[in-house]
Image (cartoon, helix red, strand yellow):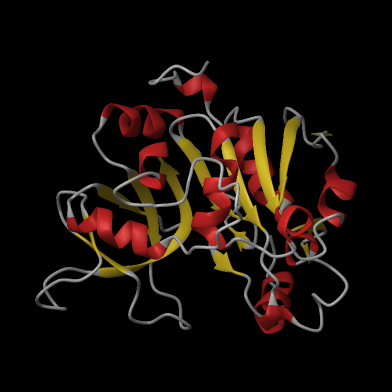
Amino acid sequence: MSSPNPSPAAAQAMLLAAGRGNRMRPLTDATPKPLLQVHGRPLLEWPMRALAAQGVERVLVNTGWLGEQIPARFGAMYAHDGGLPATQLDYSEEEIDFGYALETAGGIARALPRLEEGFWLAAGDVYAPDFVFDAEARARFLASGALAHLWLVPNPAHNPRGDFALAADGLLHATVADDTALPRYTYSTIGLFRHALFAQPWCSIPHGNPQGTAAPLAPLLRAAMAQGLVTGSLYTGRWTDVGTPERLAELNATPL
């Protein structure tokens, strides 16, 4: 049984890899988006490497569209080059189990029985090779009363208004009375989460999501933000939401 407050050494991550990738078509007609190549590696391998570099060796991946290709590519134990420790992989196969993807909150709820408390979450289609999945940041999160801690990035051209406002005390706000009062940034899709965010009163999906309820994450976050239960940090390192063929081509044309 998992300890309610595990040590940072027990860190685990979930990588989101179930989306259809419609904006990436036709590239994703025969290849799931997380397996598209970025600088010679599948896109999904980049967060796996960043996690392994910080000792986070257990990763759960949810799969959807063409999802069978992902475990076929990485297996149950993936050996990295460059002296990094291997990644132990588990899969939540939404397309196989239900015939459709469960969206972010639904997918997390499905995987939750297999995730440690205070788990890392990252999107498998975001390139952030220098992000540090820091054990001390996780320890601070576990010691806090927050339900989630999100890393935000400066707003890219495709999201100029940002997603959330970041206050000086570290609290995140979905809306503020005066849009100029607090800086707004874009959610990087990297964060730390508690199981409690995926239970009542925030989420009505039963533990393990046995019925395959599809649900987005944003409404849960906004509700928790309204109660002062979501914190955030600004990340200014390399970060790309690889959402279109043009962004993928531009990223691959940029030197490492």
Query: Which quadrant, please, contains the C terminus?
Result: bottom right
Nearest to the observer: residue 183 or residue 210: 210
The residue under the point 41% across, 42% down is 193
Q: Quadrant of residue 25?
A: bottom right
Q: Residue 225 or 34: which is nearer the viewer? A: 225
Question: Is residue 7 toward the left or the right of residue 58 in the image?
Answer: left
Position of residue 116 in the picture relative to residue 37 (left or right): left
How far from the left and from the top, in percent, is residue 60?
66, 40
Please name whichever residue, 109 or 239, is drawn nearer the observer in this view of the structure: 109
Number of labelled discs?
0
Does the rendering let one see residue 20?
A: yes
Residue displayed at 72% across by 37% down: 90
The quadrant in which residue 101 appears is bottom right
Residue shown at 50% from the left, 19% from the top: 2
Left or right: 119 with respect to 40?
left
Q: In terms of image quadrants, where is residue 82?
A: top right
The answer to whether residue 238 shows anywhere in this view is no
Residue 70 % position (x, y):
82, 52
7 lies left or right of 241? left
Vertical arrangement, residue 61 with respect to residue 218, above or below: above
Instruction: Note whether 172 is above or below 157 in the view shown.
Output: above
Whole-percent x and y of residue 79?
Answer: 83, 33
Q: Position of residue 179 (x, y in %)?
A: 16, 78
User: Residue sitting at 29 percent across and 62 percent down?
Assistant: 222
